[in-house]
Amino acid sequence: MTAFRTQESAFGASTVFQVISGTPTTTLASQLPRRERWVLLLLDGRRTVADLARLTQRSEFDVASTLAQLLQWRYIEPVPDEQETTRPFERGDHPA
């Protein structure tokens, strides 16, 4: 139980998750309880924890707990910050 609390505190309401590539989402979702299934199916690599909480009408903490469980099972991963994934030209940087 303590491991979940540690993972939940490691990400905030603006954290975005995605299903790990190669994982058959529909097959995986059919094996999960309904609470976890809804969160998994709503993950699109753009929705934040806050978005998921609003869409599922659950608290952010409740959604974070579900995400921590999915993370522990290695079904999902956090999406890197936009700054890390944006190419230099998209940020306005110019080559030297």
Image (tube, rainbow, N blue to C red):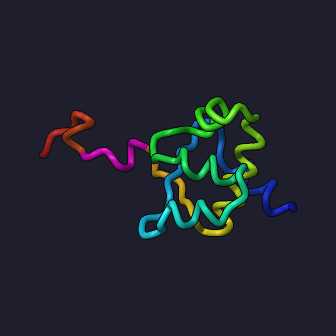
Q: Main secondary structure of the magenta part?
A: helix
In the image, taking residue 64 as reference, residue 81 lies left or right, namely left
Residue at the left extreme? 96
Q: Is residue 85 magenta?
A: yes
Q: Nearer the viewer, residue 3 or 57?
A: 57
Image x and y of residue 44, in percent: 46, 46
Quadrant in which the N terminus is drawn: bottom right
Image x and y of residue 75, in percent: 58, 65
Q: Nearer the viewer, residue 14 or 25?
A: 25
The residue at the point 46 percent across, 47 percent down is 45
When the figure is inspected, residue 79 is found, relative to residue 56, above or below; the finding is below
Q: Is residue 55 magenta?
A: no
When the figure is inspected, residue 41 is found, relative to residue 48, above or below; the finding is below
The residue at the point 70 percent across, 56 percent down is 68
| Count of marks placed on residues | 0
Q: Nearer the viewer, residue 44 or 78?
A: 44
The residue at the point 73 percent across, 50 percent down is 8
Q: Which residues are magenta?
A: 82-87
